[in-house]
Image (cartoon, rainbow, N blue to C red):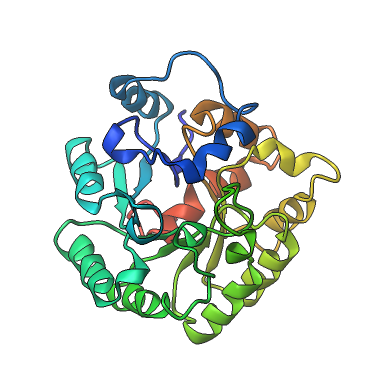
Amino acid sequence: MARRLIDYSSKPPLPELTIRHGHLSNYERVYSNAADGGEAPDLARYLQTYEDIGASKVVVKARDLETTFGTVISNDDVAAFCRDSGDRFIGFAGVDPHKGMAAIRELERAVRELGLRGLNIQCFEHKLAINDKLLYPLYAKCIELDIPVNIHCGINFSTQSNMAYGQPMLLDEVMVHFPDLRVCASPPGWPWITELLGVAWKHKNVHIGIVYMRPRVLGIPDSGYGPLLQYGRTLLKDRIIFGSGYPSLSIERAIAEIEQLDLGEDLTNAWLHDNCARFLRLDSAP
């Protein structure tokens, strides 16, 4: 029987859905050991991979970095891809917080007119801390629209932005001010893993995304991820969400490494599907 699966983070191999900018050039070096090598798949093979593994949903995220880096993955392009590729794909909007009311109006348009299902905020690419007040109107709008928000949390590898923008402790203040906000913090906060665990333990609407990392490192002693595995098995077992981070990581390899963590069948299903289904409020949620 095929395993239930939602991939919370994937980038289709299309130029309009790919950021190619100098601020991300260091990522190629950092993720070089995780890449499978060989020829990059075309769109048909990308779509067939998710068909073969039986993914019920795949989340694709837009990004508007016009003010800081002059580049965009537009909401219209993400919506068009999701529409053209079948109901397996779910889009998250991207807006530029530096644009003020225009960003709020664009988020509303993306949700109400384009059918996107969440908001993606990459704080290091906006050069804004998680608790920067420029983001507060967008957090409030997410609650009004009843959509979740993905917030980049933890280290970034851009040599043109600061790590401090993604420090998890800053999320605590946001959740104090917006307790109804549904958040997935991804990646999962390294090197401040215990900070993020504390924030998630305190705030019931905070989820943690196992995204853009090799899942196998959760079980490696002294990797810094040990507490995440411990709490992900216990107190926070219903709030861990899987995303392959493709193409930075192989879809099949990321899934296999989750399965090799010896979580047990119920917990593996929770991490790979059930927790995300509830977070996204899908019909398949248990």
Which quarter of the picture shows residue 111? Answer: bottom left
Q: Which quadrant of the rendered structure holds the C terminus?
A: bottom left
Residue 150 left/right relative to 281: right
Number of callouts: 0
| Image quarter of residue 208 | bottom right
Observer-nearest residue: 141 or 19?
19
- Furthest residue to the right? 222
Q: Quadrant of residue 213?
A: top right
**What residue lies at 31% left-to-right and 76% top-to-bottom?**
141
Q: In the rendered view, would you say 203 is above or below 33?
A: below
**Could you tell me if residue 244 is visible in this image?**
no
The spot of residue 158 in percent (x, y) is 57, 48
Location of residue 189 in the rendering, given as x and y in whole percent from the top left corner:
65, 58
Between 268 and 110, the one lying in front of the other is 110
Give the residue at x 65% y 72%: 169
Q: Is residue 270 in sight in this rendering?
A: yes
- Direction left: furthest residue: 113
Above or below: residue 57 compared with residue 278: above
Residue located farthest toward the top when viewing the structure as drawn:
38
Quick check: 213 left or right of 84?
right
In the image, taking residue 239 as reference, residue 142 lies left or right, namely left
Q: Residue furthest bottom?
A: 177
Find residue 19 and report its horizontal and vertical position in percent: 38, 41
79 or 15, nearer to the observer: 15
Give the image location of residue 266, x and y in percent.
Answer: 60, 46
Q: Residue at x 36, y 38 (%)?
A: 18
Up-down relation of residue 200 to residue 140 (above or below): above
